[in-house]
Image: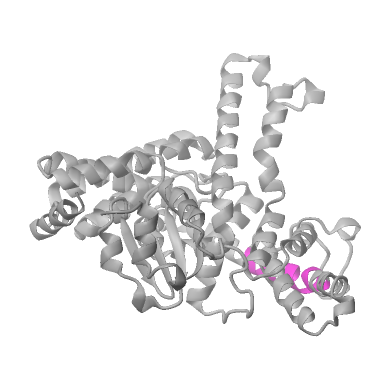
Amino acid sequence: MAGSLAQNILDGLGGPSNIKQLENCMTRLRVSVANPEKVDKAKLEGLPKVLSVIDARPEFQVVLGPGVADNVCKEIKELGIDVKQGEAVYDSVTPKMTGKSILEFLSRVFAPLIPIFAGAGLLFGIKQVFVLIFDLTGAAFFNPAAVADGGSVFMAALALLAGTFFTFLNIAIAMSACKQLGGNPYLGLVAGGIVSNVGNLAGASMGILGLTFTNGRGGALAALAAGALCAVVEKAVKKHTPDSLAVHMPSLVTIVVVGLLTLFVLQPLLGFVMDLITNIILWCFNTAGPLATALVGFMWLPMVMLGVHQGLTPIQTQLIQELGYTPLYPAGSMAGGGQVGASIALLVKYRNRKGLKKAIHGGLPAGILGIGEPLIYGVSMPLGRVFWCACAGAAVGATLLGFFPNSGSVTINVSGILGTLVNTQPLVYLMAYAVSILAGFLIVYFVGAKPEDLDAFEASHSEQE
């Protein structure tokens, strides 16, 4: 097909005039369109490197895989298309918060933070490897103790680099939330800063219900709410501010109103909510154990497919802030293992299917590294029951995690084989991941794919060549 991939995708989306907003995450191009009827979904799905197209109108998600989505987004921008690049999504009005729009909002807030979670989390994992080397060899260069206690300056610097993002995470969340609702992100910085550190108020009584001011109370959810509220208040004040006061008044009123609401309402209320959610999750994992982890493992791929897993991000962030780890993420990471095992089984069982072989070879390396979308949309989902077989394989691996309390990931968005580096119990995670691969392989090998699905898969891939 003539033209670049970016140009062809743009044409399939109805052309430049049909695009209202454009951004990308790690594997998907997210596009809000003016008229969904102008989008040619079949044409888009027939393009090379397009794994799938998700119709969540007025937004369409073009699944392209790691690296490709970012490059295509940049190319469309370089074409001179006048569209917003993921900024000020709701400039004029604040959207109604339906269930769907809340998930979409959460996705947009956390999408820019995902690569930082992954990079900083992986750096933390590397630090843990160095700590293990010190424990085994006693090499002074890898001594993790405080510098004042004889520790290594290198390790102290590495700890600083790995931990800074998580130290200021509430600020990052609040800024992103404010920005996504069309507010000044630096007002979000103020709100997130208040959530993280209440200053000299820490430990002082609020004078109501016996509550005290507490640093970090409400965590990610309070920061998210405070940042969003900044945008709402700022825009409301701007509408009623004369030009002579336009520089000072919006920020002044926003800081005072949102700051007081954060201290006296959002932090106490959302702190209670997050404590309740955390206790329920821990109760489920401690009481149900393997059953709870198996359920999370089985449902993770469908949640990723529907984008529902984004709703768990504030909860997982809060778990990391409170416990130092999240037990949800490693259980969900087993979904990647189930898919890897399922894909290998397909290679072995249907080795003569050229289209299938090509799709698996393209998605398998990313799957092993914890990026599951290429295999979800490019292999398992088009083959129907193979998708659910992969989910079953994930559940088997996740079940093993349930027998080991206090197993969790110290960050999110680092999974696959790399998840071993960021787990509180690396060997447990590695065993569970291997089990999920083996279970996915065995289930798919013996159950297999439907012949008609395989034929349709081959036909669709031959059309793209």
Asked if one can make out residue 438 in the rendered structure from this viewpoint, the answer is no
Residue range in magenta is 260-274
Seen in the image, is 40 located left or right of residue 157? left
Q: Is residue 269 magenta?
A: yes
Percent position (x, y) of residue 327? 51, 51
Front-lying residue, 146 or 462: 462
Name the residue at 14% across, 54% down: 449
Is residue 103 visible in the rendered image? The answer is: yes
- Magenta-drawn stretch contains 451: no
- Residue 240 vs residue 68: left or right? right
Give x and y (percent) for residue 406: 54, 45
| Residue 290 shown left or right of residue 358 in the figure | right
Corner quadrant of residue 250: bottom right
| Image position, residue 344 (x, y; %) | 23, 40
Q: Residue at 35%, 53% (x, y): give it.
A: 5
Tell me if residue 405 comes above or below residue 102 in the rendering: above
Please report the residue visible at 43 percent of the width from the left and 39 percent of the height from the top. 429
